Amino acid sequence: MRLSTALLSSILAFAASATALADDATPPARVSFCGTVVQFVESGCFGVPASPVESKAYDITGVHPAPAVGMLISGSGVPGGITTCNQGTHLTDVTWKKAKVCPLPQP
């Protein structure tokens, strides 16, 4: 009986700490992008540069409607989610529109 009480206490303590950690987690902030849509190495994967002057990219594979490769777009999304693409930071909840130019980032 003593072992069962100790086990139950441990489980309850773990559950309480996991709930506290989940409550402290803040969702990732939306990020903006602007650039030409490029085809990634993996089949069916595509993305855009984070900005005209940054070397990092955002994976926007799965967005509907999908922009055409070569199209200049601007938009935003939330980092995270699961993807089979191994390039760039995957974005979810992506919104985008066709752009004529991309603004340069402010210093």
Image (cartoon, rainbow, N blue to C red):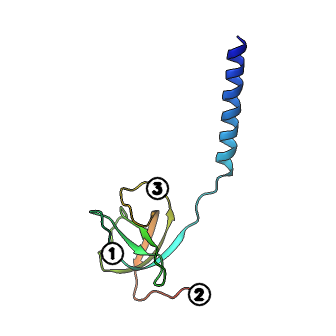
- Which label was assigned to residue 2? none
Q: Nearer the viewer, residue 39 or 77?
A: 39
> Residue 38: which numbered mark, if any?
1
Question: Looking at this rendering, what residue extends furthest in the left direction?
Answer: 43
Tell me residue 100's x, y (percent): 39, 88
Q: Quadrant of residue 4?
A: top right
Residue at which label 2 appears: 106
Q: Closer to the N terminus: mark 2 or mark 3?
A: 3
Identify the residue at image location x=42%, y=73%: 96
Q: Residues within 10 Å of mark 3 (few under 14, many from 20)?
A: few
Residues at marks 1 and 2 touching, judged by CB atoms closer than 8 Å: no
SS class, disc 3 = loop
Who comes first in sequence, dot 1 or dot 2? 1
Alpha carbon distance from label 1 to label 2 = 24 Å
* Residue shown at the point (41%, 77%) measured from the top left: 97
Q: Is residue 46 left or right of residue 4?
A: left
Helix, strand, or loop for circle 2?
Answer: loop
Q: Position of residue 74 (x, y in %)?
A: 44, 78
Three-letter amino acid code of the residue under disc 2: Gln
Residue at the spot of label 3:
81
